[in-house]
Image (cartoon, rainbow, N blue to C red):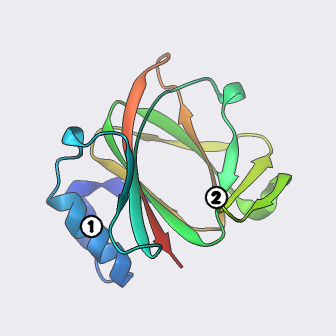
């Protein structure tokens, strides 16, 4: 897992060719003007979703992880905590959903990071994450979630 602010995104260029394309897009795009939904960049290899939702308590959120894609989540508006745990330290709650590339997991929350406007997090398959945890009460957030095929 990598967490940082877009002002430091150049430190991560060269890690992955598809990351570089996503990073360039992030640096040159105003995502506040996008409607929520799916946006294709390179077919199944690289795409993103603009999402909006209300943050909730830890008890109302779920652990998830992915097998075929790496997430690059960029906070556009609002703030949230994202829980983090290694995949192998959690219990699989439901069988892997191949169509949606998602595992739902269960386990206790031991660590979390706060994302505010301009912050991003990169979650690899071993990085189970619980997004949408409230910071100071319920809050509407807007995020862009890039999906980078492994």
Which image quadrant: the C terminus?
bottom right
In x, y percent, where is residue 106? 80, 45
Residue drawn at the location 17% of the way across and 54% of the way down: 29
In x, y percent, where is residue 75? 35, 43
Q: Quadrant of residue 47?
A: bottom left
Residue at the extreme left of the image, as rendered: 28
Distance in Å between CA atoms under marks 2 and 1? 24 Å
In x, y percent, where is residue 64? 67, 51
Residue drawn at the location 47% of the way across and 73% of the way down: 44
Q: Secondary structure under badge 1? A: helix
**Residue tagged 1:** 23
Q: Residue 150 versus residue 84: which sits nearer the camera?
A: 150
* Disc ID at residue 100: 2
User: Dot 2, how many residues are within 10 Å of its Cα: few (below 14), some (14-19), or many (20+)?
Assistant: few
Residue drawn at the location 27% of the way across and 67% of the way down: 23
Q: Residue 131 versus residue 150: which sits nearer the camera?
A: 150
Q: Secondary structure under badge 2? A: loop
Give the mark toward the camera: 2 or 1: 2
Residue drawn at the location 36% of the way across and 78% of the way down: 18
Q: In this view, does 82 lie to the left or right of 6?
A: right
């Amino acid at each position: 897992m990598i967490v940082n602010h877009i002002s430091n995104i150049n430190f991560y260029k060269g890690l992955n060719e598809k990351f570089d394309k996503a990073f360039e897009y992030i640096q040159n795009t105003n995502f506040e003007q996008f409607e929520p939904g799916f946006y294709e960049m390179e077919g199944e290899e690289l795409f993103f979703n603009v999402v909006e939702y209300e943050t909730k308590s830890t008890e109302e959120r779920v652990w998830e992880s992915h097998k075929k894609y790496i997430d690059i989540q960029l906070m556009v508006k609002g703030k949230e905590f994202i829980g983090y745990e290694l995949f192998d330290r959690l219990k699989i709650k439901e069988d892997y959903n191949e169509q949606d590339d998602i595992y739902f997991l269960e386990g206790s929350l031991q660590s979390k990071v706060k994302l505010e406007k301009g912050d991003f997090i990169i979650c690899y398959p071993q990085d189970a994450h619980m997004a949408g945890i409230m910071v100071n009460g319920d809050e509407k957030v807007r995020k862009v979630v890039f999906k980078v095929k492994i």
